[in-house]
Image (spheres, rainbow, N blue to C red):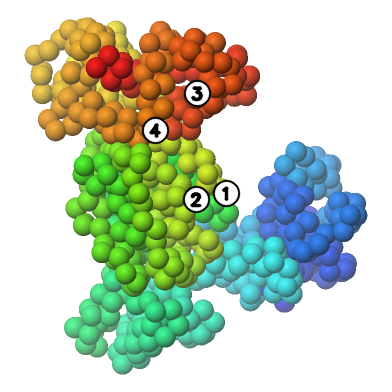
Amino acid sequence: MIRPPARPAPAGTVYFSLLGPLTAVRDGRPLPLGPRKQRLVLATLLARPNTPVPVDVLTDAVWPDNPPRTARKNLQVYVSAARALLGSDSRNGRDRVVHGCGGYRLTIDEGELDTLRFRSLARAGRAAGERGDLRTAARLLREALDLWEGPPLNDLRDSTGVAEEAERLEARCLTVYEDWAETEIELGRAAVAVDGLRDLVERHPLRERLRVAWMNSLHQSGRQAEALAVYDNYRQLLARELGLEPSPAMASLYRAMLGRGRTARPAAAGREAAHGTALPAAPRDFTGRREELRELLALLGSPDERVVVVSGPTGSGKSALALRAAHLLGDGFPDGRFHVQVRREDGSACTPAEVLCELGRLCGVRVPGGSGVPAESAVTAASAVPTDSAVPADATVPAVSQGAADAWQRWLSLHRALIVLDDVPDEAFVRGLLPRSGPSSVVLTARGQLAGLAPVHRIALGALADGEALELLAKLIGPGRLRTDPAAALRIVRACGALPLAVGVGGMRLAVLRHLPLAEYADRLGDPSAALDELVAGDISVRLRMASGWQDLSADDRRALGRLAGPAQEGGFTLDGAMEALGCGERAAIRTVESLIDAGAVTSPAGEVTAHAALYEVPRLLCLYAREREEG
């Protein structure tokens, strides 16, 4: 049965349902959707509403193995049939399905598609829960679940492409069911959730959050022995099927239930135990990066993005951005958020096996082999200034064993977690750690571009805008002091290259040297021979951080950067300037400059421009350090 939309739709409007078999009604009457291939095209467009769907994606959904030579022409026929079914957009009279540079885009409203209505109700329910209005939250989440008719698109799952879309939809439905069950338990109405949770656990026996909610609902209903049996059965299933153990959070909940006898455990505590988190404290002085943060949050909120690379030069605030996003995304990753620093205190890289062992410890994965990463070097505390450290360029990195990699991949495929791997040295280091399937996401921070990883989304950080850098300085020295000499404050942040690391260190130094006029400190930073000496605050030294990044470069790149530092200090350099400084021809100069761009030592224009027209830049403080090394 298809439930009508919650909002009345104009007469003649078609209402589609994906949360079950693909169906459509117009004015209460079912509509024929045509042959199977046409329904596959329609299902793929509806699964990505109001978003361009590439032709290749549609082709793979209809012909996963050997598309015919006429595939594009056939697609046009199927899309034309979809246009006829949908009719025109009542708002502007245009076709609902249009073709653009990104593919075919289907325009559809919330009242015309059950998945859009589902998403809207779920979002409203979660917002009510965050406000503490649990009764409204439970009602809205239940309304969303009432749209769920069974496995999404269950009549078309023999198509790999549609099956992937269906699995994403089902994962969202399961997450909303878990939200609803936890809310009902917290309201003291556990009995209404018990039977539904049991049925879902039978269909999804390895989904831990469902098990936790079922344990809690049984426990709160006074069914102590059954609640404990849920854990024991799950532990045995994991050991038998996957060689894993329940997460530390679930094990802790089990022990707490043992200690409380028949006393019902509050649902909020159970929910907290189910959502493991191992993040450093949120960066207190995080400033700016509004567009980058918005983009990162959107990417991690999308079911299609599994890996995001945040890159930028030493001191650009990569770690701070990643941690800020991780702290804001608690609801999106019910199985936890975890941060691992992949470098030791001396800047050398841990091995992938050590990092994987640490991830296993945090997530409750039994990883075969591996000696583990000392907690003090693997999971670090955040500070006002993000950490960027180095690894020798010629270091040998032992690979992850196949057994350990398989155990980790099994865990990722069964959980929706967010993993932050901080300060990654190169692509080879992380290939075995990235998810091959499942709903988990990974954020990688790195100085280099990690160009060998695909498919990933990339966010490149550069210097802060002047206003953002001044805002950061004001947080550290006080807005009143900054207002005493705003021109000198601007000179300070520009002398720091507007990098968060350097501005932060300068601000901490000024916060201690309260007698020092801003203009005098700006003069010191303006002196190329003294600037790095001035950017030290306690045990934090910009020169040491620059040295870390320097060690990541190959010997050839270090040599080239030393020669390019002179022209770079004068406002950047062109390809002709690089050829002159390096004493080489055009092709060799292009290769060298692009190698430095890939390593994160040189920045290039954001838009497309020819190599000869481009103006290349090196962060000011890296220039100063490179000149020191060249002259030394």
Give the secondary structure at mark 1: loop
Badge nearest the viewer, 4 or 1: 4
Q: Where is residue 58 in the image (x, y as percent from the top left)?
A: 76, 56
Q: Marks 1 and 2, Cα distance to the nearest angstrom? A: 8 Å
Can you tell which of label 1 and label 3 is closer to the viewer?
3
> Disc 2 or disc 4, which is closer to the eye?
4
**Element on which disc 4 rests:** loop
Please give the label number shown on residue 455: 1
Disc 1 versus disc 3: distance between alpha carbons?
24 Å
Q: On the rendered image, what quadrant is the N terminus found in?
A: bottom right
Which residue: 86% across, 51% down? 72
The three-letter amino acid code for the residue at tag 2 is Val
Residue that appears at 49% across and 67% down: 413
Q: Residue 269, how many percent across, how many down?
A: 28, 70
Specify the quadrant of the image occupied by residue 607. top right
State if disc 2 and disc 1 touch (CB < 8 Å). Answer: yes
Neighbor class of circle 2 (other Cα within 10 Å; few <14, some 14-19, many 20+) is: many
Under circle 2, the secondary element is strand
Q: What residue type is labelled 3?
A: Val
Return the residue at label 3.
593
Q: Give me the disc on residue 307.
A: 2
Name the residue tied to disc 4.
Answer: 554
Does 338 sit above or below residue 50?
below
Q: Where is residue 321 in the image (x, y as percent from the top left)?
A: 37, 39
Q: Does dot 3 land on a helix, a strand or a loop? A: helix
The tag earlier along the polypeptide, 3 or 4, is 4
The amino acid pointed to by label 4 is Ser
